[in-house]
Amino acid sequence: MGDGTTKHIRVYFVTPDKDGILTHQDSARKGRAIAELNLDGSYIFTNNKIDESDKVKLFEHFIDDIKNSFFSNNT
């Protein structure tokens, strides 16, 4: 987005997703579309089963993804 001056800034979203907007991949909800297209990662803090993708995952993947992102960009 924009002129690229903020391209290096990563944006992550952590949520309990109590209303279930991010839970299902085939959902036509705006929140899931934003999470898939505009964020670097969204992590749902729940014990329930969710439809995971490369960008929407359970919170248990958060730390490993941050580590992988940091080390892959600073080698």
Image (tube, rainbow, N blue to C red):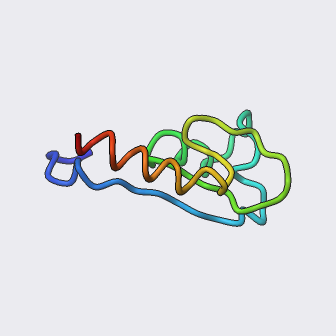
**Residue at image point 52% right, 47% down:** 34
In this rendering, the count of numbered labels is 0
| Residue lying at the far right of the rendered structure | 48
In the rendered image, the vertical position of residue 57 relative to residue 60, given as above or below: above
Image quarter where the N terminus lies is top left
- Residue 9, quarter of picture: bottom left
Report the front residue among 25 and 9.
Answer: 9
Image quarter where the C terminus lies is top left
Q: Left or right: where does residue 68 sit relative to residue 28?
A: left
Q: Can you give x and y, in whole percent of width and height, for residue 11 in the image?
A: 40, 56
Q: Can you give x and y, in whole percent of width and height, for residue 23 in the image?
A: 75, 48
Q: Left or right: where does residue 60 sit relative to residue 40?
A: right
Q: Can you give x and y, in whole percent of width and height, for residue 44 in the image?
A: 68, 57
**Residue at image point 78% right, 61% down:** 46
In the rendered image, the vertical position of residue 28 relative to residue 34, given as above or below: above
Report the front residue among 70 and 12.
Answer: 70
In the rendered image, the vertical position of residue 34 relative to residue 20, given as above or below: above
Q: Left or right: where does residue 24 sit relative to residue 65?
A: right
**Residue at image point 61% right, 52% down:** 31
**Residue at image point 71% right, 66% down:** 16
Report the front residue among 61 and 38.
Answer: 61
